[in-house]
Amino acid sequence: MHLNPSTITSVLFTLALLALTGCAGTTQPSRFYMLNTIPEEGALPAPGLEGEAIALGVGPVTLPPYLDRPQIVTRSATNELELGEFDRWGEPLSASFSRVLAENLAFLLDTEQVAIHPWQRSTPIDYQVSVRVLRFDSAANGDVVLRTLWRLLRDDGRELVFTRKADFSESAGSSGDYAAMVAAQSRVIDQLSREIAKDILELHKWESSGGAPTGK
């Protein structure tokens, strides 16, 4: 049987359309995740301060390049990374980390005067917390690891008060459960937030009383 060129073109177009339709019908939908703040139920803020509330600036928060992507990153081995093809962040991770850290610190320090970097120069800031994230992913055994270097500054970021290195981990259960992993990532930010709040409170009380800080 002889087919003219127009018939062949029509057949090929129909087959291609069917193939595309079949692929579209089997594509797995993407899932999007958000980090969460400290749950207020059952969680108590650190002891408050007398006088005016602390004015705090949070940021910048910087991430290593391997985390600066929409896909959620996990480690399948020490030197091997995996990207969640269908499991993604609902907002840029650096923005999400900054937002959650700021909300946590506002709760823990009992203050509404919290600004997220960048802020206007006219914004009153007593202390500024900048965070350099070195690692923030899930290991092959399912444990989430957060490793950071964070700094406390004042005088509009011109004076360094101190630098801290902080390492935290939380079990996410079995590896491959992205919802559990993101929940564990929220918990390690909770731990970091509490450490930062504790150090800020200690420093602020020391400066207010003229005494000496303890434990550091």
Image: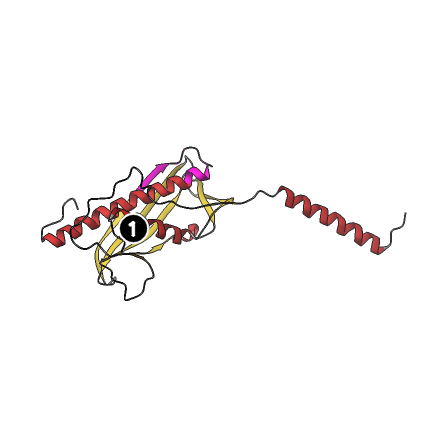
The reply, left or right, for residue 106 in relation to residue 3 is left
Of residues 50 and 98, the one drawn nearer to the viewer in this rendering: 50
* Image x and y of residue 64, in percent: 39, 52
Within-10-Å neighbours for mark 1: few <14, some 14–19, many 20+? some
Stretch of the chain drawn in magenta: 168-181
- Is residue 176 highlighted in magenta? yes
- The image shows residue 109 at horizontal and vertical percentages of 24, 49
Read off the residue under disc 1. 149
Give the residue displayed 43% in from the left and 50% down from the top: 66
Q: Quadrant of residue 151?
A: bottom left
Q: Residue at x 44, y 35 (%)?
A: 175
Q: Is residue 160 magenta?
A: no
In this rendering, position of residue 102 left or right of residue 32: left
Q: Quarter of the image holding residue 9?
A: bottom right
What type is the residue that disc 1 sits on? Leu
- The single residue placed furthest to the top in the displayed view is 174
Question: What colour scheme was applied to this rendering of the protein?
Answer: secondary structure
